[in-house]
Image: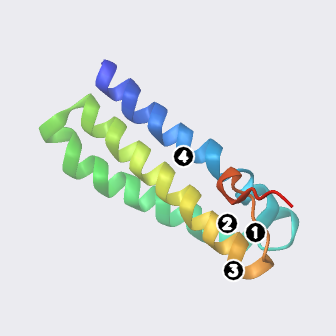
């Protein structure tokens, strides 16, 4: 199960790097965008699990979850940047 733990850890790392994008969208009246992104991520997670679990077992489930979680975080970062022009990711930190 170590491989599953590595996949899930990487997915959580991506989520933590992207910052509070979902919270920012929700608090600024863009909760519908967040809900649609979450729905798309859930559908993607189910589809990936259906493809990967029969062949790879728990590692496939962990990879599917990490991929959908990471993709959701990156998608939310895109929406926050495009709609609000706010950068919530730690990667967008700049010195003044």
Residue that protrudes farthest toward the left in the picture: 55
Q: Residues within 10 Å of mark 3 (few under 14, many from 20)?
A: few
**Closer to the camera: disc 3 or disc 2?**
3
The reply to whether the C-beta atoms of the residues labelled 1 and 4 are less than 8 Å apart is no
Question: In this orientation, does residue 35 appear?
Answer: no
- Label 2 or label 4, whichever comes before in sequence order: 4
Q: CA distance from mark 3 to mark 2?
A: 13 Å
- Label 3 or label 4, whichever comes before in sequence order: 4
The reply to whether the C-beta atoms of the residues labelled 3 and 1 are less than 8 Å apart is no
Q: Is residue 85 left or right of residue 6?
A: right
- Image disc number at residue 82: 3
Residue at the image point whose x is 69% and y is 60% from the top: 92
Q: Residues within 10 Å of mark 4 (few under 14, many from 20)?
A: many
- Image disc number at residue 34: 2
Q: CA distance from mark 2 to mark 4?
A: 17 Å
The reply to whether the C-beta atoms of the residues labelled 3 and 4 are less than 8 Å apart is no
Q: Dot 1 lies on which element?
A: helix
Q: How many marks?
A: 4
Q: Position of residue 63 (x, y in %)?
A: 33, 41
Residue at the image point whose x is 87% and y is 63% from the top: 27
Q: CA distance from mark 1 to mark 4?
A: 21 Å
Q: Dot 2 lies on which element?
A: helix
Q: CA distance from mark 3 to mark 4?
A: 19 Å
Residue bearing the label numbered 1:
31
The image quadrant of residue 13 is top right
């Amino acid at each position: 199960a170590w491989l599953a733990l590595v996949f899930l850890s990487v997915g959580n790392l991506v989520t933590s790097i992207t910052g509070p994008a979902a919270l920012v969208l929700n608090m600024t009246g863009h909760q519908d965008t967040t809900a649609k992104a979450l729905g798309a991520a859930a559908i993607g997670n189910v589809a990936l699990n259906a493809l990967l679990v029969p062949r790879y077992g728990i590692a496939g489930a962990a990879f599917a979850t990490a991929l959908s979680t990471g993709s959701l975080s990156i998608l939310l970062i895109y929406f926050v940047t495009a709609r609000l022009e706010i950068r919530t990711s730690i990667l967008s930190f700049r010195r003044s």
